[in-house]
Amino acid sequence: MLTASTSRAVRSNVHPRPLGARETRRGLLLINLGAPDGHDAKSIRRFLTQRLSDPCVLTFPRHWRWLRRLVAGSMARRMARRSAPAYRRIWTDHGSPLKTVREDQVAAIRKQLGDDWFVIGAVRYGEPKIADALRQIVAAGVTDLVVIPMMPHFAASITGTTLDRLYQGVSRSGLGLNIEVCSNWHDDAGYIEAQALLIGGQIAQHELTPDDTVLLYATRSTPLAHVNGGDPYETQVRRSAELVNARLGWPSDRTRLSFHSELRLPAWLTPTTSQTLAELAARGEKTVLVCPLGFTADCVETLEQIDSAGARQLEHEGGRLLQCPSLNTFEPFVKAVSVIARRGSHPFSDQCAVPLLRGIDETFDLKGAIEKLIMVGVCAAGRITSADEPGIGHLSRHQFRRIKRPQSGALELLRAVHSEGHYAESWLWNTCNRFEFYGLRHSDDGPVASNHCVEDVARCMFSDAVDVPDANVLHGIDAWRHLLQTAAGLNSSLPGDTDVIEQLGAAYRLARHAGVAAAMVEQLLAEIRQIVGQVRTRTPWGRFGTGYCHAALNELAATVRPPWSECKCVVIGASTTSWSILRTLVDRFGVPQEQLTVVYRGGGRHRMVKMLRQASGRGRRVLVRQYAERATIDAIAGADVVFFGVDQAEPIVRARQLADLRRDVSGPLTIVDFNTFGSTDRIKGIDGVRLIDSRQIEAHVDRFAERIIANHEFHSAATAAREAIAAHVENIVQSGQRSRHRPTQTTRHSEPAALRPAATLGTDA
């Protein structure tokens, strides 16, 4: 029997692909348990016989195993007669709901992953069989296959038997596939977020509160003997319930967990859903919201069988039973499964989760939020200085590079800060010019508490620094003024930099992914975008706005041969930097989209991936799991110019790889690396390769900036922008105005309109 410890990531039949071989095509196989072919008793009996004959479901002592099929057939006949009316009530013109949902999930995830992936579904019992799906996968040219059982909790009777059948199909057919299985995702951040958002939507729709409602998490049951033998199912289910509850912000004493099974066997996990509902009814509970925790698709269990004697008793006592749907094709769930396919599961941290249900229907108090605002961080010196920002010191670019962290470390930093418990919400502005933490304290507890807040942040931010700097620390209105001036491009190395506001949007999305930003941060950043937009449109400052990538490529154009418009360009990275490079190449320099190739990872940044696809248009797109893999080198092989728009400390291209590549490729190669940490390793000196690194790019941007500053109207425009911001700050101080924005309901899962991309995006390098 397959165990959970062997199924996190299993590979078989690994065949390395030589240089010049056909391109890798990725596939995704989604497996669910299955459903009967029809709603008549005969079809149901056939399905149940297959399920109950599984040795992972009905366990017998060694000398009595011959009885299994006899017992299974007898049980299936009785259960089929009892279940047939329920199946008839839920049946549709397209078959069982499980079949319809499975097909819709496959279509939605295929759309999410893009044309680079072949996505197909199968079931453990019934049709379509796993073996048939594997044959279709190979026929489609798939070489690398990810398998996701659509059951987030590992149970031998559910996931284990499914994977046993998968491996039997692979071994018997001798298929040449690289297979990776993602079967333990009960604590995946995307899954927990999707489940919490779905339940939170039901809570908001029915206006439920913990005072009058109990949340009942109902999941499948499994043999108690398996759990006693080390099966992790019960532990994983309870952990999922705890994490969803933490994300919702629902009191733990107002929740219950039950185990549902149509088998109704005493030797399976309890309490059953019927027993729990009867208990709640006897206690006089008025409302119970049943949340199908382990079900990712609606089926007879979720649609009919929970409506049991316990539910009827609850209603008889004057209460009401509400039922949350399964995840089905809920958009955040589709995104979560897509991320698991691309990058594997990532555990959710309940210690720093911002409750979704906090502050619903409260009017956002802008002045009150600003009073709780703290900024701690460092920044590189901009091209223009400001006398009205006391307490702000600047580092040289060399000093700043020694402090800055790659974007991959920002998530852990935010969670580490929040684990101290001082901040309600926060975000981290982590760019090539600033490393600044902004936090909203829970309350104004005086200078002693404020000092502790600052010390905790500084310890987390600079724990790995070689030379710990004196961090800038701003409170309240001073932090707000600095935030606005930075967002307006007044503190940047490129004066008027329009990319900064988009970097702020990226910081917000990262903080939401970390579970540390919600409604308050969303409203603050909405205010910032609106104020900066007014400053740019109502003062001459808007005439001097430009993007970092535009400035860099404009300067580099004079030194690159052949011209950009004749180059085959490869852009590597799923970032605003990469998007800005693509747009600048197409719009400013007229590079045909057919000459573009973009190499990207999907990750959790679905909006950015869609933007990359739109910007590259008819160009070639290569989806990778890690940038330092063979597909990236293959993309570079046919390029004239390669742009790196990633932000990671680990090099992507090393000298030996590039030297081997150059033996087979003629013509010069230019590498333009926007990554502050450097995306290459020791490639200088390789014949035919020219490297333009981030420091050289900065020098080019500096020359562009000098021409901007030399304009005789520049300084008066900058002064007008500062005066407009100062007037806003004074208005806040004097009037204590409230925001014009209505609060965003925290059960939303879409990105706020105020933080969606504007007409121009830029670098987040």
Image: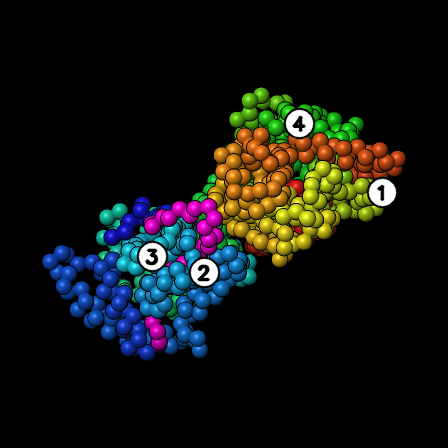
Determine whether label 2 and label 4 are within 8 Å by CB. Answer: no
- Amino acid carrying mark 3 in the image: Leu
> Marks 2/1: CA distance?
52 Å
Residue 41 position in % (x across, y down): 30, 77
Determine whether label 4 and label 1 are within 8 Å by CB. Answer: no
**Quick one: SS at disc 3?**
loop
Q: Which residues fall within the magenta stretch?
A: 12-39
**Local crowd at mark 3 within 10 Å, few (<14), some, or many (≥20)?**
some
Which residue is at the far left?
A: 63
Residue 92: quadrant of the picture: bottom left
Determine whether label 2 and label 3 are within 8 Å by CB. Answer: no
Which comes before the other along the chain, label 3 or label 4?
A: 3
Determine whether label 3 and label 4 are within 8 Å by CB. Answer: no
Q: In terms of depth relative to the viewer, which is nearer, 704 or 138?
A: 138
> Marks 2/3: CA distance?
17 Å
In this picture, residue 135 sits left or right of residue 340: left
Say which residue label 3 marks. Answer: 175
> Marks 2/4: CA distance?
46 Å
**Quick one: SS at disc 1?**
helix
Which comes before the other along the chain, label 3 or label 1?
A: 3
- Amino acid carrying mark 2 in the image: Val
Q: In terms of depth relative to the viewer, which is nearer, 311 or 269?
A: 269
Q: Is residue 580 visible?
A: no
Q: In the image, which disc is placed on residue 119?
A: 2
| Residue drawn at the location 46% of the way across and 53% of the way down | 22
Q: In terms of depth relative to the viewer, which is nearer, 138 or 246?
A: 138
Dominant SS in magenta: loop
**Local crowd at mark 1 within 10 Å, few (<14), some, or many (≥20)?**
some
Residue 34 painted magenta: yes
**Local crowd at mark 4 within 10 Å, few (<14), some, or many (≥20)?**
some
> Marks 4/1: CA distance?
29 Å
